[in-house]
Image: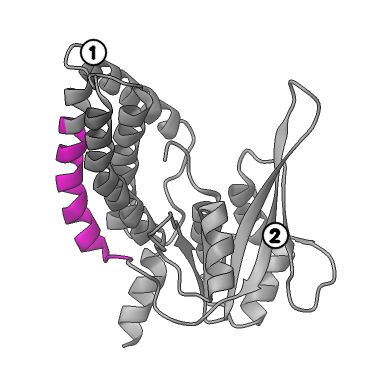
Amino acid sequence: MLSEPRSGRLAAWGNALLAGLVSPDAAALAIVGEDAVHRVEGLPGESAPVGLTLALGRLRRLGATGLRMALPAPGHPLGLSGPPEFNARALEAEEAVICHGAAFGLVPEVYEAGPAGDVHAEVVWHVLPVREAPPADVPSLGEAERELAEALREATEVLSQLDVAGSGPVAEAAIDAYRARAERGREVLAPGYPPRAVRVLELAQRVGLLVSLAYGRGHGGAVSSAEMAARAEALRPVERTARRAQVASYNAVVEERERGAR
């Protein structure tokens, strides 16, 4: 969770485009980010992959009024609604985007290209049919924010227990470095998102960073397989909470629109 999921960028900037808040070129540039190129394959009426601007326009004409992100993990189909074939592809990629208003989903496939020392990422988004149903296990922003506050305390406590002498300074240094990188020219989410969604996403990223640090500390203070298993067991619900909050943040625009239409 140290970098923004590609599905998050597609959902956020796709929503801004669908709302008329950014131009197609600006949305495509933000979605591609540091990758070399993104193409979309399997669009109805297209026999070959097409660019993002054409794809987003086509999805809008097919009825898409918003985009949701999914971040599934084994045993946790977070944000998915089926069918099984789509869920399996999304689980393999560990992320996906689901259209609201049109029964399509997009799953990224990432390729590395270029010579040694100048390798870059190329992404193909595969368009597949999805079931029009509520996404699995996505909380409201309010629920996510409350859960994150507790998860942050739990993650900090677990991290400090891994290596009492060193984990605290290491954690703080990593968080400071991550915050500095994040603040250099990066816009959190996209135009049109409520401030609460930005706040929840930033907190979810901080919790995710703490979890990554805890896993990345190697054995840390654990001296037995039982203690290592206990550490993983303690971190698992914290990581799940951070993922749920991240999805709630990216999906906030669509969820608010749905609530307003009821």
Task: Name the residue located 20 percent from the left edge and 40 percent from the top edge.
Answer: 152
Q: Amino acid at mark 1?
A: Gly
Horizontal relation, residue 111 to residue 172: left or right: right
Residue for badge 2: 52
Task: Name the residue located 67 percent from the left edge and 59 percent from the top edge.
Answer: 125
Q: Is residue 21 visible?
A: no
Q: Quadrant of the C terminus?
A: bottom left
Mark 2 or 1: the one toward you: 1
Residue for badge 1: 166
Task: Name the residue located 29 percent from the left edge and 17 percent from the top edge.
Answer: 170
Q: Is residue 129 visible?
A: yes
Which region of the structure is painted magenta? Answer: 138-157
Gap in Å between the C-alphas at discs 2 and 1? 46 Å
Main SS, magenta region, reads helix
The local secondary structure at tag 1 comes to loop
Sequence-first tag of 2 and 1: 2
- Provide residue 188's location: percent of width, then percent of height: 42, 46
